[in-house]
Image: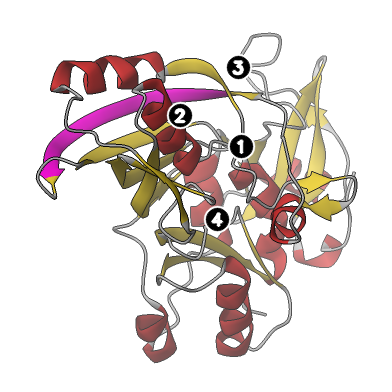
């Protein structure tokens, strides 16, 4: 059975669900999932899991992401990106480069961010975007996010300076809305703003260099096998033959070398355990002097979870 990750370069105009549907046909299996959505307007890295590798996706969702984006100052939209209608226009001619860079600095580090109202966040069981489209006013609560890097590459004045386009790179924690950054930068500068282009270049350890277009994948389905995917994603632990046998049956073994430290493996951040032959056997969490399996991938215990 084919199992592993597929790193897709998502095309513009496709939903993440569209890409999953296409991959189900290409891989010949219904068991396909993704590790975090990309808006239809966005392109770039979308990590898909096939069959057993879908069990790795939960550990990928929370990793940091990196984006290349273009922010337009001087226009606000209902969706905070170019997909929505313009709701306000204010000349950005008076906005200086220093003011832009100061605004970017204020939106860096640990911040409280109000997600875009046209988002997939559920409000009383209904998607926020569905409520907005039905004419309801939606106010979402602010949430903590971390902007590790917010770097300005170019500032271009367009339409006689009425609008300003800014090319940026953003590296951020999971759950960050880049279009909300564009909105908040524009509001802080008093002219409004929205996102006009977005390309995701990294999801955790997986990059655009590894990604393939759907056309390329239709010609040759490139799958990152389970062992390689896990080695890149989390701390590694090499097992002996005896330990491999114990873990394969769901039994605990001696704790890893980081046990008792801040780097100890946990159920939320486990270590990937490999057999002497290099095969991914399980994900382990340290508990006192023992390590116990969180997930077991051994062929004879495929459905075993702890």
Which residue is denoted by mark 1 in the rendering? 115
Secondary structure of the residue carrying tag 2 is: helix
Q: Name the residue: 49% across, 55% down.
A: 228
Which residue is denoted by mark 4 in the rendering? 227
Whichever of callouts 1 and 4 sits on the residue coming sooner in the sequence is: 1
Question: Is residue 206 rendered to the left or right of residue 177?
Answer: left
Question: Is residue 260 rendered to the left or right of residue 153?
Answer: right
Which residue is denoted by mark 3 in the rendering? 263
Q: Position of residue 290 (x, y in %)?
A: 81, 23
Residue 29 appears anywhere in the view: yes
Within-10-Å neighbours for mark 4: few <14, some 14–19, many 20+: some
Which residue is denoted by mark 2 in the rendering? 184
Q: Position of residue 235 (x, y in %)?
A: 55, 33
Within-10-Å neighbours for mark 3: few <14, some 14–19, many 20+: few
The Cα atoms of the two marked residues, 2 and 3, are separated by 35 Å
Q: Position of residue 133 (x, y in %)?
A: 70, 60
**Does residue 155 belong to the magenta stretch?**
yes
Q: Nearer the viewer, residue 119 or 257?
A: 119
259 over 139 or under it: above or below: above
Whichever of callouts 2 and 1 sits on the residue coming sooner in the sequence is: 1
Q: Name the residue: 48% across, 64% down.
A: 224
Within-10-Å neighbours for mark 2: few <14, some 14–19, many 20+: many
Q: Quadrant of residue 16?
A: bottom right
Q: Nearer the viewer, residue 238 or 192?
A: 192
240 over 172 or under it: above or below: below
Whichever of callouts 2 and 4 sits on the residue coming sooner in the sequence is: 2
Q: Residue furthest left?
A: 160
Look at the image and give the residue range highlighted in magenta.
145-157
The Cα atoms of the two marked residues, 4 and 3, are separated by 21 Å
Q: Name the residue: 52% across, 31% down.
A: 173
Instruction: Tell us which disc is closer to us: 2 or 1.
Output: 2
């Amino acid at each position: 059975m084919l199992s592993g990750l597929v790193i897709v370069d998502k095309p513009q105009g496709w939903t993440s669900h569209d890409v999953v549907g296409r991959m189900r046909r290409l891989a010949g299996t219904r068991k396909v999932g993704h590790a975090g959505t990309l808006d239809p307007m966005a392109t770039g890295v979308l990590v898909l899991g096939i069959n057993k590798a879908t069990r790795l996706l939960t550990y990928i969702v929370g990793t940091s992401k990196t984006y290349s984006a273009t922010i337009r100052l001087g226009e606000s939209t209902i969706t905070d990106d170019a997909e929505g209608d313009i709701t306000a226009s204010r000349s950005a001619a008076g906005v200086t480069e220093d003011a832009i860079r100061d605004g970017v600095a204020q939106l860096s580090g640990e911040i409280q961010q109000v997600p875009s109202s046209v988002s997939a966040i559920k409000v009383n069981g209904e998607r926020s975007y569905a409520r907005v489209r039905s004419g309801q006013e939606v106010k979402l609560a602010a949430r903590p996010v971390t902007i590790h890097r917010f770097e300005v590459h170019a500032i271009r004045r367009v339409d006689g300076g009425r609008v300003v386009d800014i090319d940026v790179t953003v590296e951020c924690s999971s759950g960050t809305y880049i279009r909300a950054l564009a909105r908040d930068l524009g509001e802080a500068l008093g002219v409004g703003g929205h996102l006009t282009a977005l390309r995701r270049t990294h999801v955790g350890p997986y990059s655009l260099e590894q990604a393939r277009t759907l056309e390329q994948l239709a010609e040759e389905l490139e799958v990152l096998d389970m062992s390689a995917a896990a080695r890149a994603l989390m701390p590694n632990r090499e097992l002996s033959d005896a330990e491999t046998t114990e873990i394969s049956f769901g039994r605990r073994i001696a704790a890893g070398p980081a046990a008792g430290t801040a780097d100890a493996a946990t159920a939320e951040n486990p270590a990937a355990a490999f057999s002497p032959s290099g095969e991914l056997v399980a994900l382990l969490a340290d508990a006192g002097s023992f390590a116990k399996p969180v997930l077991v991938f051994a062929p004879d215990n495929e459905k075993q979870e702890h």
